[in-house]
Image (tube, rainbow, N blue to C red):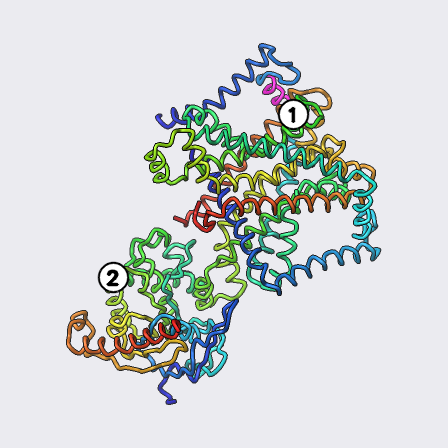
Amino acid sequence: MAGLEGQATDQATLAEAEARISHDALRRFDDIFRRGAGAFSILALLVAWEVFARSGKVTPFMLPPFSVVAERIYTDAFHGDLWINLGLTLYRALTGFFIAAIGGVTLGALMSRSRLVRWFFDPLISVGFPMPKIAFLPIIILWLGLYDISKISMVVFDAIFPVVTATLAGIAGVDKALIWSGRNMGAGERQMMWQIILPAALPQILTGLQVALPIALIVAIIAEMAMGGYGLGGAMMTASRYANSPGVFAGIVEIAVVGYILIKAMAFIRRRLLVWHTETAPS
Amino acid sequence: MENVAKTAVRYLPIVIVMVAWEAIARLNLVDTLALPPLSKVAAAWFDLMRDGELVSNGASSLYRGSAGLLLAVLIGGTLGMIMARCRIFDMLINPLVELFYPLPKSALIPVTVLWLGFGDGSKILLIFLGCMIPVTIGAYNGARGSDHALLWSARSMGAGSFRMMWDVVLPSALPELLNGIRTALALAFILLVSSELIVSQRGFGYLIGYLGSTGSYEGMYAVVLTVALLGFAVDRIYQLLMQWLLRWRD
Amino acid sequence: MDGQAQIVVERVNHTYRPPRGRPVLALSDISLDIRPREFLALLGPSGCGKSTLLYLVGGFLPIEAGRILVEGKPVAAPGPDRGIVFQHFALFPWKTVRGNVLYGLERQGLPRPEREKRAQAFIDMVGLHGFEDSYPSQLSGGMRQRTAIARTLAIDPSILLMDEPFGALDAQTRSLMQTELLKIWQRSPKTVIFVTHDVQEAVYLAERVAVMSARPGRVKAIVETKFPNRDPSILRSKEFVEKVDQLWNMVRDEAIKAQEATGS
């Protein structure tokens, strides 16, 4: 059991670090000087990209100018498959993520309630968590074929581990006094879980989800790359196969934007859900 | 003796899963092509070891992984520490780190292939780029937390700026830096195996794909399990290393 | 002023600039002379800038106005001639007691056998024999501060800067440490600047006490607190109690004034 809780603590450290980053980002928000520097360095990166690509030191194949890539994204969006690809990738990643979230919280809650369930799953999860589960992709293809179901399954398989461990650690960390006072007020087992234990464990559960979300995206894209077809990953792979370098770089920019928006949205949801919670207090 | 029994009870579920696997396959409950019995997978593993396929492919995977990770740790760690200590660097580099931090790293696979082809170079670059961000963030957060009283003490005892970096900032940053490296380690395995699976002519991932496409599913299972267990073992060994390096904490 | 002074602080001002908000004048027109081997306490309410003054002498903060001379030379940077001891010990948590004490000696470039011998001597002196291989996290607060003192004394600074060194210790440990510090100081006299807000501690330890006012920090008075002997029995003597009373009134006035200033 020490192993599982250890992993959860590591995750908590990770999330603390991330919370600190977003806190810093927030504080920086009102620091105009810093923001100016930030905009400057991103702009400088884009300008450097454009200038370097046009300087003739690299072939347009190695690095197409940013303007060409932007044009390609524009064409994809209005005359191409960008929205289909984007929709499919999001569908696969998010469906997998939600199944992993619900399944992971359920399994974590069951493990914390039942000694038998915990005995059975504890070693499987502590051994499975650090494994590179992506290696199982060909096996999953073998079982489930090349359709969405196999991609979503791969996402679930990879994303569920951090959710389970975070839920377990969150529930283990719930203040005993809270549980006693709940019992005292006559809450039943089900009410205890829904109204006391899960809300109290929510900060850690959300941390687990914040770890799981980027994993879901990474895995969905890898699965698409390996299987081909529609989707942002598949489109990038096709572009790469036809040596279409603007297509490859357009894919990176598109995926980066999607990742950025999803992660910011998740952080926003966390803040909304935890308004009652002083994030500084150890959860 | 009691400890042995405890460990046995603890890991019994893994044995149960293995036995169930063997039984399901032997009783033909599912297609044996899709799920060969564990014993046959083990036999295939020994065959692969004997003809050297596993070792030679494994060696090139390990070379790529450790080279990329080493670069990421050295460059990312240095960058993070400099960012924490130098305001201008911080202001210029931090926005870029924040921009690349949410990028699903797998998106880099086709680009590294475009730049460096199908060989070792593209894999090393991919792992380096993917793993650098968590290491940088770990080093940055850790180094920023270093106590100014420690820095002052070191200075008053005669340490110069470089010595302070090495003697005070680095050890202060170590707990968070090591956590960042642990994240990078897991990421390195994912990127390595998936890039080899998708575009490569060598390595664990390639071997998995090759055996799968030729229908030797027993061998494929053997390599998949080898990679999974290797990832698990490396993580555990790394955790022990971390404990030892941080033994000074209470 | 006169050639006797080892440390000369002359018309020093210091402005504290918080990352956000208005700058605050922390020290205003401070002048002080400190003689060689003198034990001087800087006493004042919190926020009077006494630690800031100490950091300026240490060379940790830039001097913006006025000047500070040590042995006739202006202070530009921290140096091993001025050892510092912090309230929260500032030990390297990743080094053992021995490693901490050795650190400064390594930086001074002493050959290894001499380093080891010297470190051991100072560890023994502060009574930590047997704890050489313990990490700070395994020690009590008092033992940590002993380690910090040994580490600073080992590099043999001629000046000892102490920033509320016993402020984080419990009452019993604090009085033990005070007595021990006096013993050490009597055995190898060094110039000591000792920052504290504890009046009794200042009177007991120091030969002179500089009382500081708050916001902005000024030297309000310099009081001689020399007693014929310094064993703990004087704590109950009439002169001692009177001195404490006199200084306490000065500090209290300042504390009240500081409170009113922030209140209005």
Q: Compared to A27, does C260 lie above or below?
A: below
- Secondary element under disc 2, as helix, strand or loop, is helix
Q: Regarding mark 1 in the picture, which secondary structure is present there?
A: helix
Residue placed most toward the observer, C14 or B109? C14
Question: Residue B35's image quarter?
Answer: top right
Residue in front for this viewpoint, C57 or A92: A92
**Residue in view at x 63 percent, y 23 percent:** B221
Q: Locate residue B29, reporting x and y percent.
A: 60, 12
Residue B128 visible: no
Tell me where residue A238 sits by quadrant. top right
Q: Provide residue A78's location: percent of width, then percent of height.
A: 81, 43
Residue C242 left/right relative to A44: left
User: Extreme top residue here?
Assistant: B27
Task: Determine which of the numbered discs, if any, sits on residue C171 in the image.
Answer: 2
- Please, which chain is the residue tagged with disc 2 on? C
Magenta region includes residue C69? no
Q: Are marks 2 and 1 in contact (CB under 8 Å)?
A: no
Q: Which residue is mark 1?
A: A140
Q: Amino acid at mark 2?
A: Ala
The answer to whether residue B237 of the structure is visible from this angle is: yes
Region of the chain picked out in magenta, as a range:
B40-47
Label 1 chain ID: A
* x and y percentages locating residue C223 in the rendered image: 28, 82
Q: Residue furthest bottom?
A: C2
Q: Amino acid at mark 1?
A: Ile
